[in-house]
Image: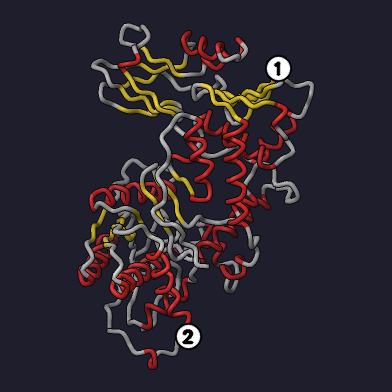
Amino acid sequence: MRPPAPADADAETTGPERPTLAPPQPSIGQPSIGQSSIDQPRIDQPIAAAHHFLTRLHPSSTILVAVSGGSDSIGLLLALHHALETSGAPHRLVACTIDHALRPGSAAEAAAVARRCQGLGIPHHVARWSHSGVTSGLQAEARLARYRLLCAAAETFGADLVVTGHSADDQAETIAMRAARSRQGGVDRDRFPIGLPPIGLAGMADAVLFGRRLWICRPFLGIRRQAVREMLTSRGEGWIDDPSNDDPRFERVRIRKAGPQPSAARAETAPPDAAAGRLRSAAVLSDRLTRNVRIHEAVAAEIALADLDLADVGWQRLLALLAATLAGKPHPIGQETAARLVSSLGDPAATAATAGSCVFERRGGRLFVYRERRNLPPPLIVAPGQSLVWDGRFTVENTGAVPLTVKAGGDPALTARLTSRDIPAGIAGRVGRASPQMLSPDGTPAGNEAFCLSPVIAPYDTFLPRFDLMIAQSMAAKFGRAPYPACPVDDIAMK
């Protein structure tokens, strides 16, 4: 059998148009090692990675495998199935295929994956994405929908985690894309101010927490796609090929097609200690956040100027993360904005600067960071029993019997609490006017028993890479939130 050549659909590049794919080839049995001309050590790598993953997984876990039918995901499913059968590890495999319904034939392919799982005795679910009404950003919406559907499937199966088939090729392509963006942005590689060059070049994390509740792990992140395909071929297994992974409209495909063995070439350009450096950076930032930053009512940050070193890259990144959280933004400010902010804050004549929808104000030997009043949302009505997010900063749950209106406005009680904490009255007033106020139907302030207000940590509440878990935990503690759940896998990366 000659397996299909293009890359696997597990790479995060699901496109708006996916041509009809060939169904998977049926299994024709597993030839003996002597019959195979494929390098034996490389054949063994996926199986070894699966065993390595299981040894670090918390006992008696249910693992949901995201299976598109491509080589990476089919390889992961079969490697984990083999590892469980041969090791006797007390885990259970289930599987889910997301049918994005973006082209004819996708339902038939999902059904083919279901039959393959049935043959292995693995419970399988097909989740179909209803994307009516999505008119722009289809690729990003498809990715977010995929993870939401996987999360729902995990709840149905009682799964403890999801695993995906992202490979070392996907990792190298991700690093290459981020490096290219950094070059296009004119990054000063001697200083790396606030932006992501050294952080982004760490690549994808081996595990990501989605929606504050479900860990998505990548056991094959250190395994080349060719090794997975050779393992499948040696066992007479086929896979579904997705031609959209050859579509040059997508950045990842262009990186992949840049030349012979682009993934391997790009991998050599990544700093060898980028991932370790990101973990060290996270530890430093977590410590600084804990020791040097005060968070007031989840609406303002305070830092003593004596503790703040604007020339320090770590402090720059921490300011960017604080601003993103206080402004309800999932992404920190960009590199050009960051450079302007650092320049403004370093000017003795300037007392305030704005960036990323936040005000950075120096007063009395302290730096205060808080949401600016521009572009605040209109009043939001929250029905009884309903829970909505306001301004990307707070989840508002109506626990009462009547509708509530949430609006930005000077809550005198909040302003008084801020002033009592030695925050200058002018700053306290400005913070209060940009903060949420809960009103009853008659326009009077709602009582505390009528609602529950919980801070949103926008940079991490949707996708939290394991690299940043320490920072996120410190941020949650500072903002009065429950901690994020720990990853059920102690370590995934092959040593």
| Front residue (pair 192, 374) | 192
Q: Secondary structure at mark 2?
A: loop
List x then y, in percent, for residue 281: 62, 47
- Which is more N-terminal, label 1 or label 2? 2
**Up-down: is 43 above or below 51?**
below
Query: Is 390 placed left or right of 381 in the picture?
Result: right
**Up-down: is 114 above or below 343?**
below
Q: Which residue is mark 1?
A: 364
- The colour scheme applied to this rendered structure is secondary structure
- Residue count near mark 1 (Cα–Cα under 10 Å), binned few <14, some 14–19, many ≥20: few
List x then y, in percent, for residue 488: 38, 53
List x then y, in percent, for residue 243: 41, 66
| Front residue (pair 3, 461) | 461
Which corner quadrant of the image does residue 345 belong to? top right
Q: Secondary structure at mark 1?
A: loop
- Quadrant of the image containing the N terminus: bottom left
- Given the image, on which type of amino acid does mark 2 rest? Asp
Which corner quadrant of the image does residue 236 belong to? bottom left
Q: Residue shown at 36%/57% (left/top)?
A: 58
Residue farthest along the bottom direction in this orientation: 34
Q: In the rendered image, is residue 138 in sight?
A: no
List x then y, in percent, for residue 308: 70, 32
Q: Residue shown at 68%/39% (left/top)?
A: 336
Which corner quadrant of the image does residue 48 belong to? bottom left
- Given the image, on which type of amino acid does mark 1 rest? Gly
Q: Which residue is mark 2?
A: 39
